Amino acid sequence: MQQTLTKYLPETAVKPCFELIKGSHVHLKIVNERVTRHGDYRRRKDGNHQITVNASLNKYRFLITLIHEIAHLVAFEKYGRNIKPHGLEWKRTFQYLMLPFIRPEVFPSQILPLLARHFKNPKASSSTDAHLSIALKLYDEQQSEKSYVYELPIGSVFRIYNGKLFKKGNKRTKRYECTEISTGRMFLFQPNAEVELIKS
């Protein structure tokens, strides 16, 4: 397992992550990319714990995702199964488990201040933190040819991963109002959502 982790994690994070996995008695499964999620945690019917993480993530996002999922397990074990999945107990657990990794030996220096800010109040997904998400994407092995919603001019038509077409509208406080072309329904998009520009 430790050898496998060296392929997916920053070098200095391998040993402490291995110890966390071992100590949590969790089965880690590295899986092919799922568009809608980076990872997940579940307690299996036999009572064992399983975490899955996408193999396609860069090593920094892999680390954040792995600790995110371990935090679910630890929070449920400590506080019981009735807590909210991304409630206060999970946030505190995630902060506590992540703290030893927010160091220049693990993360590039330009990501550290964004991580520090994110972990003051961690969200259900690091992808909803546009600044952190964009900074992390710079370390992807294959740079995407897609555009971010925030880069597109108002009125642009774009396609998302499932083929649906949208027209970009105005920005609310944080997200953009976008109208689905086929139905006329309005949806809110994160500024860092990756989309394919069809017509600007």
Image (spheres, rainbow, N blue to C red):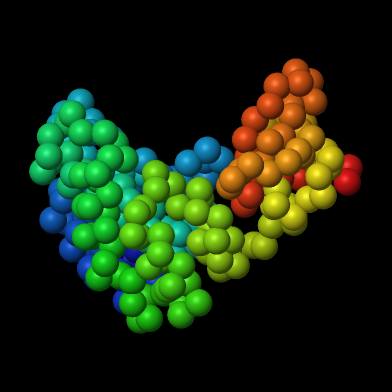
Q: Which quadrant of the figure contains the N terminus?
A: bottom left
**Spot occupied by residue 79 in the image (x, y as percentages of width and height):** 12, 39
**Spot occupied by residue 155 in the image (x, y as percentages of width and height):** 84, 40
**Spot occupied by residue 102 in the image (x, y as percentages of width and height):** 33, 71
- Residue at the front extreme? 173
Instruction: Report the side of 173 relative to 30 (left or right).
Output: right
Q: Nearer the viewer, residue 150 or 9?
A: 150
Q: Residue at x 28, y 62 (%)?
A: 98
Residue 64, placed above or below residue 34 = below
Residue 73, placed above or below residue 135 = above
Q: Residue at x 21, y 39 (%)?
A: 49
Residue 105, placed above or below residue 29 = below
Instruction: Report the side of 188 relative to 197 (left or right).
Output: left
Tell me if residue 70 can be seen: no
Rendered image quadrant of residue 7: bottom left
Q: Nearer the viewer, residue 116 or 46?
A: 116
Tell me if residue 81 can be seen: yes
